[in-house]
Image (cartoon, grey):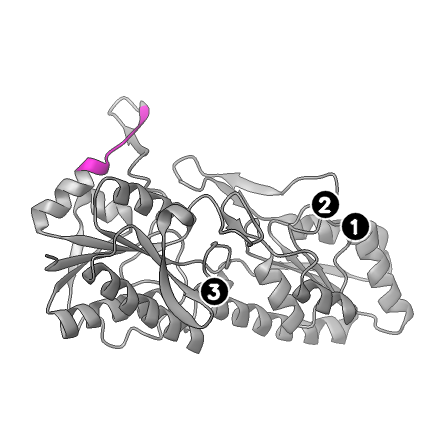
Amino acid sequence: MIKKIGILTGGGDCSGLNAVINGITKAAITSYGLEVVGYLRGYNGLYHNDFIPLDLKAVSGIMHEGGTMLKASNKDNLFNYRMEDEAGNVTYQDVSDVAIANMKKEGVDGLIIIGGDGTLTSARDFARKGVPIIGVPKTIDNDLPATEMTFGYTTALENIVDALDKIHTTAFSHDRIIVVEVMGRHTGWLALEGGIAGSADVILIPEIPYDIDKVVDKIKNRISGGREFSIIVVSEGAVPKDGDVHVRELIEDSADNVRLGGVGDVVSRQIAERIKDYEVRYTNLSYIQRGGIAAQFDREIGLRFGVHALESIMSGEHGVMVRYSAGQVDTISLEDVVGRGETGETSKGGAKYVDAKGQVVNVAKTIGIAFGD
């Protein structure tokens, strides 16, 4: 019998996390009379038994707020945890049993874990050890398989479109070529859908390797047609033909240790070398995309995810993830989510990729947006 529920948020922050926390907490207290605790800074809090009690007052007024009231961390894989002794020697150990012991000590009967691929991989591993677990998909990149949409994505798109609207005014006024880099890791959803809505002229995404000379040809065609400015939206994971992703840095103690970024700067310099008579500028939207007041959809789907996650664990479902499918919220086994996609999805290595020949790309090409292919 479940009497006490724990919540944690792992990985990067995004808008809609607080809506999920709100939904879980209110449903747990109002409908089931449960106690609720929130572990701070993701799995770090679970390992160090660092938590706060959550009641109706604690979650009041948080629905619209970006980020997470519980804080987050993407550096704590408890199944491969970085340990350093006094001499500075580093080893990696499985400390998951410490986390389970902490739960038992505090009487926490089950966990609702909110996060992306790395966070949910650990959720699956805890479920394999018998811990009652429900996963909630979270990423602004919209790259998790098995769910049509994740919360945080819509708010990030709105932030991108708002930025492109503002950048357009400068590009037009000064006849400039402006390259805008957005997030997305190894998938191009943010660049594609944000770029289309933001009237980009060129969109470069990981799923369609680009030829810089074809990008330049598009810009020159616009200039010859009297349109002396261009907006190029570049996903951080975009790759040139016969090239590779641009790695910004490697984070040694992070579960997701490869940090992409900077390809937009490379593209802008390559364009400037080939088009001498026009100024080329580069901007990286970076963390501006992640935060801010949550959009309506992210609040709603976050709340629905939270309530359904709570109802699922109370009905005896364990080791599953809630998902959005055909307008409804249901569940799917974490075993079918982490590391692989469902049959029929365009997926590689567990991620949900843009279909390079799909409807959205075809619409963009039909109205004249170039992809450098």
Mark 2 and mark 1 in contact (Cβ < 8 Å)? Answer: yes
Identify the mark at residue 212; answer none if there is no mark: 1
Q: Is residue 354 above or below residue 48?
A: below
Q: Of residues 28 and 62, which is closer to you in this image?
A: 28
- How far from the left and from the top, in percent, is residue 200? 70, 68
Which residue: 68% across, 46% down? 239
Q: Which stretch did the figure color magenta?
A: 90-97
Q: For residue 332, what is the image quadrant?
A: bottom left
Which residue: 83% across, 51% down? 213
* Residue 4 shown left or right of residue 243 in the figure: left
Seen as rendered, the residue at the extreme right is: 224
Mark 3 and mark 2 in contact (Cβ < 8 Å)? Answer: no
* Residue type marked 3: Met
Q: Of residues 225 and 123, which is closer to you in this image?
A: 123
Q: Is residue 56 visible?
A: no
* Residue type marked 1: Ile
Q: Is residue 196 visible?
A: yes
Query: Which label's residue is closer to the chain start, 3 or 1?
Result: 3
Q: Nearer the viewer, mark 2 or mark 3?
A: 3
Q: CA gap, disc 1 to disc 2?
A: 7 Å
Query: Which label's residue is closer to the chain start, 2 or 3?
Result: 3
Residue 293 belongs to the span the image colors magenta: no
Say which residue label 3 marks: 149
Please, what secondary structure does the residue beneath circle 3 have? loop
